[in-house]
């Protein structure tokens, strides 16, 4: 039994898809969440910048006595997991392997699609992991750079002509490639599940990277004792907007305004 909190971070709101899953699957856990809302998006930036930002995010989280860290961000997991894990004396869990493992369990046709930010797709992390585990797979990838700003602005509903156009634009090629499984390789994308599913049809299974990482945390970290856990939220900018949109991700409101962090000082 270990009641120390789990640190969870993302460039913004996306990591809340992992927090939602942690709340469902591990309601006793205490969680410290950091969303780097002053510097989102990460996914358009070069690896050196992503690593620098991620180190500051971890340094802030480590001001708490944590039992583990979940990198609830496909971009940071793809680019910086090895660096962060090597520098840490507590477990650091990324989204890439748990998500790939789930996709490998789901696919029947061995044709898997991966969507993510530009940096994630450029890194090749998901593709490499999948093909190492199962070389006979066919993996099709596509960067979707405009999805994160759409999600951060709450433009996620079916019927929204802008997001529906983007989904068509980004996913038409994958649709023609006969995939049966699509990795949502960015933790913001589960919010687009409805629009994506209605475009690709029910024969394509969508894999949620935030939920997969949360499930990995459950197997890797010593559980907390009895009693409902608490979650504290921190952001680097605009706590009010974060709180306003957080409900979409968490399916419940955040009771208090998130606390503001000067992340560049870490
Ligand atoms: N949620 C982050 C991810 O999973 C978004 C990255 C970004 O800020 O561009 O990749």
Image (tube, grey):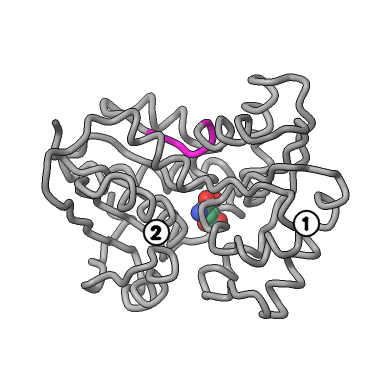
Q: Mark 2 points at which residue?
A: 36
* Crowdedness near tag 2: few (<14), some (14–19) or many (≥20) residues, C-alpha within 10 Å: many
Q: 122 or 158: which is nearer to us?
A: 158
Specify whether residue 96 is painted magenta.
yes
Q: Name the residue under label 1.
A: 171
Q: 258 or 191: which is nearer to us?
A: 191
199 is higher (above) or lower (below) than 75: below
Q: 76 or 254: which is nearer to us?
A: 254
The Cα atoms of the two marked residues, 1 and 2, are separated by 28 Å
Q: Number of labelled discs?
A: 2
Q: Where is residue 217 shown, x and y percent of the image?
A: 35, 36
Q: Where is residue 20 shown, x and y percent of the image?
A: 37, 56
Say which residue appears at 27% left-offset and 61% top-offset.
234
Q: What element carries label 2?
A: loop
Identify the magenta region: 93-97
Specify whether residue 132 is painted magenta.
no
Q: In this view, does 206 lie to the left or right of 24?
A: right
User: Which badge, 1 or 2, comes first in the chain's sequence?
Assistant: 2
Quarter holding the N terminus is top left
For label 1, being within 8 Å of ligand 1 is answered no
Q: Where is residue 42 shown, x and y percent of the image?
A: 53, 54
Q: Are marks 1 and 2 in contact (CB under 8 Å)?
A: no
Q: In this view, does 52 lie to the left or right of 202?
A: left
Task: Judge depth for marks 1 and 2 and give the one in front.
Answer: 1
């Amino acid at each position: 039994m270990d009641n120390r909190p789990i640190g969870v971070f993302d460039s913004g709101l996306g990591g809340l898809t992992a927090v939602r899953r942690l709340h469902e699957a591990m309601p006793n856990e205490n969680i410290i969440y950091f969303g780097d809302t002053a510097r989102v998006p990460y996914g358009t930036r070069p690896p050196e910048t992503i690593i620098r930002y991620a180190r500051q995010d971890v340094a802030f989280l480590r001001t708490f006595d944590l039992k583990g860290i979940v990198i609830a961000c496909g971009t940071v997991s793809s680019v910086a997991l090895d660096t962060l894990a090597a520098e840490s004396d507590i477990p650091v869990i990324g989204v890439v392997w748990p998500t790939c493992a789930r996709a490998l369990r789901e696919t029947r046709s061995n044709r898997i699609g991966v969507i993510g930010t530009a940096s994630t797709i450029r890194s090749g992390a998901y593709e490499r992991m999948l093909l190492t585990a199962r070389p006979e797979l066919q993996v099709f990838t596509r960067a979707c750079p405009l999805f994160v700003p759409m999600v951060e602005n709450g433009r996620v509903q079916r019927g929204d002509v802008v997001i529906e156009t983007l989904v068509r634009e980004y996913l038409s090629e994958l649709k023609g490639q006969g995939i049966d499984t699509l990795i949502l390789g960015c933790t913001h994308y589960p919010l687009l599940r409805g629009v994506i599913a209605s475009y690709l049809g029910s024969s394509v299974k969508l894999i949620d990277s935030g939920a997969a990482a949360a499930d990995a945390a459950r197997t890797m970290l010593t559980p907390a004792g009895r009693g409902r856990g608490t979650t504290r939220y921190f952001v680097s900018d605009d706590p009010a907007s974060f709180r306003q949109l957080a409900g979409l991700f968490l399916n419940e409101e955040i009771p208090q305004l998130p606390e503001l962090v000067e992340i560049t000082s870490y």
